[in-house]
Image (spheres, helix red, strand yellow):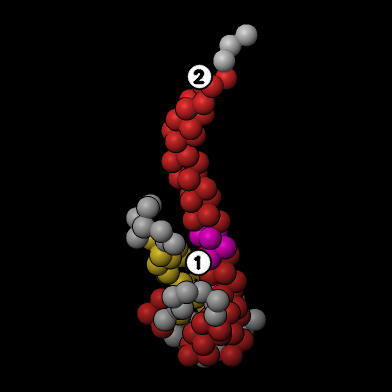
């Protein structure tokens, strides 16, 4: 038999070597999950905004609906993040499009400052 006291420090050293890898893995999972959730929120907001644009033919109402649908984002959407085209469905009998570009900041600065996400909703004018 061998003496367990001689291996006491080995466990602490092994844990110290593995801990940074585990922390990076957990932080990566958290950041990816958050980005995935924000992407789903952006897609739903773009879909809601284009629905309002296609039905009401009002770009300002479409922007407002998009911002309301993405109300849980931090930082919140601005008018500069939302592009609505065409400006009026009466001019174009084709499709209305709402495009959102959003800079998602990371919780930690370990992976950088953030990631650029985008979503687009397209619907035929007049529903």
In the image, which disc is placed on residue 6? Answer: 2
Residue closest to the far right: 127
Tell me what residue is drawn at x 56 percent, y 84 percent.
68
Identify residue for label 1.
119
In this view, the residue in front, 122 or 109, is 109
Tell me what residue is drawn at x 60 percent, y 71 percent.
44
On-image quarter of the N terminus: top right
Distance in Å between CA atoms under marks 2 and 1: 58 Å
Residue range in magenta is 34-38
Q: Main secondary structure of the magenta part?
A: helix
Tell me what residue is drawn at x 51 percent, y 74 percent.
73
Q: Helix or strand or loop: what does disc 2 sit on?
A: helix
> Relative to residue 21, is residue 97 depicted above or below?
below
Query: Residue 35, how many percent across, how many down?
Result: 51, 60
In the rendered structure, which disc, 2 or 1, sits on the residue that comes first in sequence?
Answer: 2
Q: Helix or strand or loop: what does disc 1 sit on?
A: strand
> Relative to residue 71, is residue 107 depicted above or below?
above
Q: Quick one: label 1, few (<14), some, or many (20+) residues within 10 Å?
A: some
Query: Residue 76, how many percent across, how many down?
Result: 46, 78
In this view, the residue in front, 32 or 53, is 32
Q: Nearer the viewer, mark 2 or mark 1?
A: 2
Residue 54 visible at all: no
Residue closest to the far top: 1
Query: Residue 63, how many percent across, how many down?
Result: 49, 84
Figure quadrant of residue 75 = bottom left
Does 119 lie within the magenta span?
A: no
Does 35 lie within the magenta span?
A: yes
Q: Is residue 19 left or right of residue 123?
A: left
Residue 84 visible at all: yes
Tell me what residue is drawn at x 57 percent, y 63 percent.
37
């Amino acid at each position: 038999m061998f003496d367990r006291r001689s291996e006491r420090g080995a466990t602490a050293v092994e844990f110290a070597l593995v801990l940074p890898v585990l922390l990076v893995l957990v932080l990566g999972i958290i950041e990816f999950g958050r980005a995935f959730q924000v992407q789903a929120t952006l897609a739903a907001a773009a879909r809601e905004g284009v629905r309002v644009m296609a039905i009401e033919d009002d770009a300002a109402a479409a922007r407002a609906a998009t911002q309301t649908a993405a109300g849980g984002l931090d930082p919140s959407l601005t008018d500069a993040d939302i592009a609505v085209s065409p400006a009026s469905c009466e001019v174009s009998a084709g499709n209305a499009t709402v495009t959102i570009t959003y800079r998602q900041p990371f919780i930690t600065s370990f992976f950088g400052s953030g990631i650029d996400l985008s979503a687009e909703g397209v619907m035929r004018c007049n529903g």
